[in-house]
Image (tube, rainbow, N blue to C red):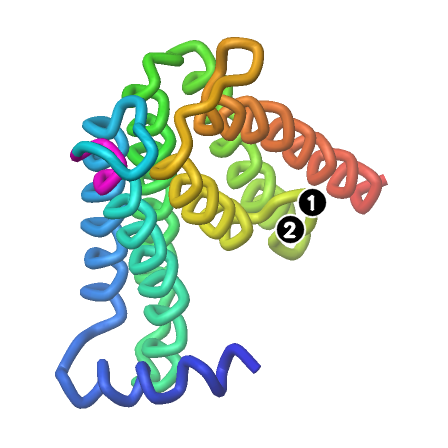
Amino acid sequence: MAERVLEPFVTTANRAGLTPDGVSVLAFVFAVGAGGAYTLAGTAVWGIGPEASLYLVGAVLVFFSGWCDLLDGALARRQGTDSRAGDLLDHVLDRYADIVIVAGLAAGTGTYLLGFLAITGVLMTSYLGTQAQAVGLDRVYGGLVGRADRLAIIGLVTVVAAFSSATVAGLTIVGWLLVFFAVVGHLTALQRFYYSMAALS
């Protein structure tokens, strides 16, 4: 299904002369833009002021970043240029993209401790997925929330944040999003660790 949806975009990118590495870099640029928008967004007021529009801008940029992240691999397969170097570049840029997006969310709400916990959860999830491969297993993608899910959730929540400044227990919806990533990220990392250890036993 995903391949069929991507097909016209892969064809267009190929005809435009884009390379998979170029698309990976573009995905990162969109992520940096999203992080910047979230940093400046602060607390949104329903339908009023620039803060609301910045959350919406961030959501759109997150969508474009995630779309490019899907596109680069499909384009590499189309062009027959998929390689270990390209895979490495993609993963490094993905991790930096995760950092700037989550850090932007934390900076915009001033919840730096939650941001730290969320970033470490996200990074440990990704680390455990690839570390399994380093010890001879297949790369692990399982767990509660993968990267594609995470980007989709960020986009949806920040669209809602553009229209609501409500707080629960002193946290906005973006603050609770960081709590979610902090808890679920580390749980997903532990799930992957458990799976890998069981496979090695």
Q: Taking 54 as reference, is 44 above or below it?
A: above
The residue positioned 29% from the left and 33% from the top of the image is 100
* Type of amino acid under label 1: Gly
Mark in front: 1 vs 2: 1
- Left or right for 132, reference 66: right
Tell me if residue 51 is in the magenta stretch: yes
Q: Residue furthest left?
A: 17
Residues at discs 1 and 2 in contact (Cβ within 8 Å): yes
* C-alpha distance separating marks 1 and 2: 9 Å
Residue at 20% in and 58% down: 26
Crowdedness of circle 2 by 10 Å Cα count: few (<14), some, many (20+)? some
Q: Image quadrant of residue 78?
A: bottom left
Magenta stretch, main secondary structure class: helix
Name the element at disc 1: loop
Q: Quadrant of the N terminus?
A: bottom right
- The residue at which mark 2 appears reads as 140
| Near-viewer residue (111 or 133) | 111
**Magenta segment includes 173:** no
**In the image, is 33 to the left or to the right of 111?**
left
Query: Where's residue 191, x and y in %?
Result: 73, 36
In the image, residue 13 lies at what x, y percent?
22, 81
- 159 sits to left or right of 50: right
Q: Which residue is mark 1?
A: 143
Residue 13 drawn above or below residue 33:
below
Numbered disc 2: secondary structure: loop
Residue 91 seen in the current view: yes
| Image point (55%, 51%), residue name | 149
Q: Is residue 35 visible?
A: no
Residue segment shown in magenta: 50-54
Task: Say which of 46 and 80 sits in front.
Answer: 46
